[in-house]
Image (cartoon, rainbow, N blue to C red):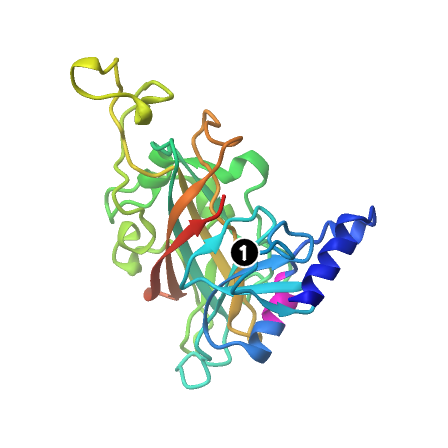
Amino acid sequence: MLKMMTAALTCALSVAPACAQVLIDSEVCTRLQRAYPPGLYVVHPLSSNVVGNPGRDEGCTSDGDLCVRGATGPAYYDPQARFYYKAVPSANRPDAGREAAWHVRTQTIADGIADADAAYVTRPAKRTQCSPDSDLPTLEGENRYVSTRRYIDYHGDKGRRGPDPELSRSFHFKLENDDSTGTCIGSDDDSLGGLDRAYGFKDVARTTQRVERVAQSLLEPTGANAGPRGQVMNKFAGLSSEFAYRRPGAVDCFGFTLPLPTRRDRMGVATWKPQTTLVVIKRVRPGSVEPLLETTVRWVGQ
């Protein structure tokens, strides 16, 4: 603890660029692989306002310039932090030694806002067994915020899906089949048995148009004294859908984004106070999706 507090104070008094620390997934996963059991973690860099802050870094394990906290208990939200998931080693799995992919879905409830009408959608730009000569295209910048209507339309059940070349090309990707044929099967292939069951958001319905509502409606009185209110589409303030990928032989570990506000009117960006985040992780294989983890993270101390 003293080591972390001293380092945090030094960083606070410094103007060195190193204090604006960016987590590098491969480096964090190497540490998790070496010394931590499988599970979900929130990892804070040294420059975080959590490190060296009495009370906030309680429960953090100091690992050099990182603060590692298991996500099974209350966690402090920190914009510089990331989620990390260390999977159970795949040595005994039939696809051991092959490429691996995971899908992560998060749904966040926050103070004072709801009705998320977009989702943060992303996948790393990496080379895969089915794209060995060039990095996969990926969504960039504001294009990562995909309307819930568009997301739901593309991830409908077989026969009810609308075409979306950009999501097909820049979000989904192909994996090499586990058999010896060398064929490639897309993560959005109909053989999965329904993309809504594989990647859909729970309790987020498709709407024909955005329902207008008063910004403070969640805080308005009810009954005779209530002002005009719009319809609440869903209770969530932030939604995300991410793929993670690892090449053959790499560790079964990956990082992904902490919850973000995803209303397209940008409501909540300046006052973001998440309360709980549902995290659902599934392993993606050619033609199948296997549930691995479903848990709720509770955010405190904001």
Give the magenta part as a residue range.
25-30
- Whole-percent x, y for residue 41 in the image: 49, 64
| Kind of residue at badge 1 | Gly
* Residue 287, above or below 117: below
Q: Residue at x 37, y 53 (%)?
A: 188
Is most of the magenta stretch helix, strand or loop?
helix
Q: In terms of depth relative to the viewer, which is nearer, 207 or 222?
A: 222
Q: Is residue 184 visible?
A: yes
Q: Residue furthest bottom?
A: 92
Q: Residue at x 75, y 49 (%)?
A: 12
Quadrant containing the N terminus is bottom right
Residue 176 located left or right of residue 78: left
- Whole-percent x, y for residue 51 in the image: 63, 57
Residue 6 within the magenta-colored segment of the rendering: no
Characterize the local packing of mark 1: few (<14), some (14-19) or many (20 or more) Cα atoms within 10 angstroms. few
Q: Is residue 65 visible?
A: no
When asked about the image quadrant of residue 225, the answer is: top left
When asked about the image quadrant of residue 152, the answer is: top left
Look at mark 1 in the image and give the residue it sits on: 55
Residue 27 within the magenta-colored segment of the rendering: yes
* Residue 290, above or below 152: below
When asked about the image quadrant of residue 213, the answer is: top left
* Total numbered badges shown on the rendered structure: 1
Q: Residue at x 52, y 51 (%)?
A: 257
Considering the numbered disc 1 on the image, is that residue within a helix, a strand or a loop?
loop
Residue 8 located left or right of residue 286: right
- Whole-percent x, y for residue 102 in the image: 44, 62
